[in-house]
Amino acid sequence: MPCFCPDEAIFVLNKWDTILEEDHRRELIDITKEKLHELWEEIDDNNIFKLAAASSFVFVFFFQMKKLSFLIKQHSL
């Protein structure tokens, strides 16, 4: 199937923060890994990432705004 090395592929499972129950999260990751391995046996489980992009974006945006605020204050002095 692949036309590239499986070691170079990553799989991102987004909206991970919407799954509230830990048991459901574990079950879902196990099922997802199983399905991916059925399609592509060489997949490395270390290349499967769980992400909450909306939460990450909010954190990065907040951090950048704090940094900008700090720079403006420093420039005003």
Image: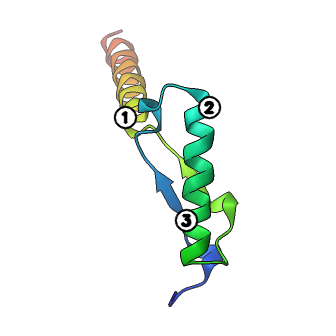
Q: Residue at x 51, y 89 (%)?
A: 1
| Residue at the spot of label 2 | 23
Q: Who's the residue at 54% across and 56% down the image? A: 32
Residue drawn at (59%, 74%) of the image: 38
- Quarter of the rendering occupied by the C terminus: top left
Of 64 and 34, nearer the camera is 34
Q: Amino acid at mark 3?
A: Lys
Quarter residue 71 falls in:
top left
Q: Quadrant of residue 23?
A: top right
Q: Earlier in the sequence, mark 3 or mark 2?
A: 2
Mark 3 surroundings: few (<14), some (14-19) or many (≥20) residues within 10 A: few
Residue farthest to the top, as pictured: 77
What distance separates the C-alpha of mark 1 from that of mark 2?
A: 26 Å
Out of 30 and 44, give the one closest to the viewer: 30
**Residue at the location (48% across, 55% down)?**
12
Task: Give the vertical position of 36 relative to 49 (above or below).
Answer: below
Is disc 3 in contact with disc 2, using a CB cutoff of under 8 Å?
A: no
**Is residue 28 rendered to the left or right of residue 44?**
left
Q: Quadrant of residue 36?
A: bottom right
Q: Which residue is mark 1?
A: 57
Q: Is residue 9 left or right of residue 75?
A: right
Q: Which residue in the structure is indicated by mark 3?
A: 35
Q: Where residue 69 sits in the image (x, y, percent)?
A: 34, 16
